[in-house]
Image (cartoon, helix red, strand yellow):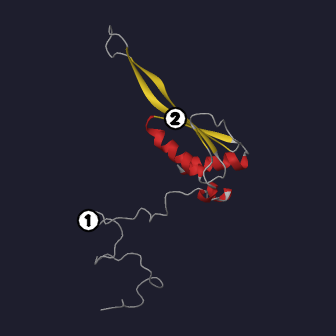
Amino acid sequence: VSAYISRAAKLFNEMEKTYLTITATGNALTKAVTSAEVIKRRFKGLHQITKLCSQEIVDEYEPLEEGLDKVTDVRSVPCIEIKLSKEPLDKSDKGYQEPIDESLVTDVDPEELMKARGRGKGRGKGRGKGKGKDKGKGKGKGKEKGKGKGKGKGDASPPKGK
């Protein structure tokens, strides 16, 4: 939804468009309505006209074996078209909604809307514990002498500790 809101900010602010249309079909209907409601709460004075419709989708399947007929499946999918406009729209339209109260609108800087928000800071991938023997670098009680952070080269001083 945030991508739609930043796109709306670009259309209204940078490109100075007076209206935008959100169209959705099937399972995306709720996302379109949510996007429109959030956009209405970001920009003052947006008029709205909502149209509901249905689209017919024809699926044609080719048979795997020869000699069989093609199978066609016709589905009717619901669709919605939401037009948000800075200029007044036709108030006699049955899907018309006037702008919401300005106390409900929170103006946001265009730069703030354009910033990519990512998916959180996260904590990196981590190395995990592993499930094998003698794999990776560890601080085990091994007998091998590896490269440590010690001073100098060679065995000039005895090892510290017990």
Q: Secondary structure at mark 2?
A: strand
Q: Which residue occupies 30% across, 76% down?
A: 140
For marks 1 and 2, the one nearer the N-term is 2
Q: Nearer the viewer, residue 63 or 141?
A: 63
Q: Position of residue 60 (x, y in %)?
A: 41, 18
Q: As shown in the figure, which amino acid type bears the numbered disc 2? A: Ile
Spatial CA distance of label 1 from label 2 is 59 Å
Image coordinates of residue 91 in percent, x first then y, are 64, 37
Numbered circle sitting on residue 80: 2
Q: Residues within 10 Å of mark 1 (few under 14, many from 20)?
A: few
- Looking at the rendering, in which quadrant would you find the C terminus? bottom left
- Identify which amino acid the numbered label 1 is placed on: Lys
Q: Is residue 128 left or right of residue 34?
A: left
Question: In the rendering, at what x and y percent does residue 85 appear?
Answer: 66, 42
- Where is residue 146? Give x, y as percent: 38, 75
Secondary structure beneath dot 1 equals loop
Q: Is residue 81 visible?
A: yes
The residue shown at (56%, 49%) is 3
Is 67 left, or right, of 103 in this rendering?
left
Q: Quadrant of residue 50?
A: top right
The residue that appears at 62% across and 47% down in the rendered structure is 7
Q: What residue did someone put label 1 on? A: 133
Judged from this view, the residue extending furthest toward the front is 92
Label 2: how many Cα within 10 Å (few below 14, some 14–19, many 20+): many
Q: Residue at x 49, y 44 (%)?
A: 31
Q: Are circles 1 and 2 on residues that touch, CB within 8 Å? A: no
- Quadrant of the rendered structure where residue 42 is? bottom right
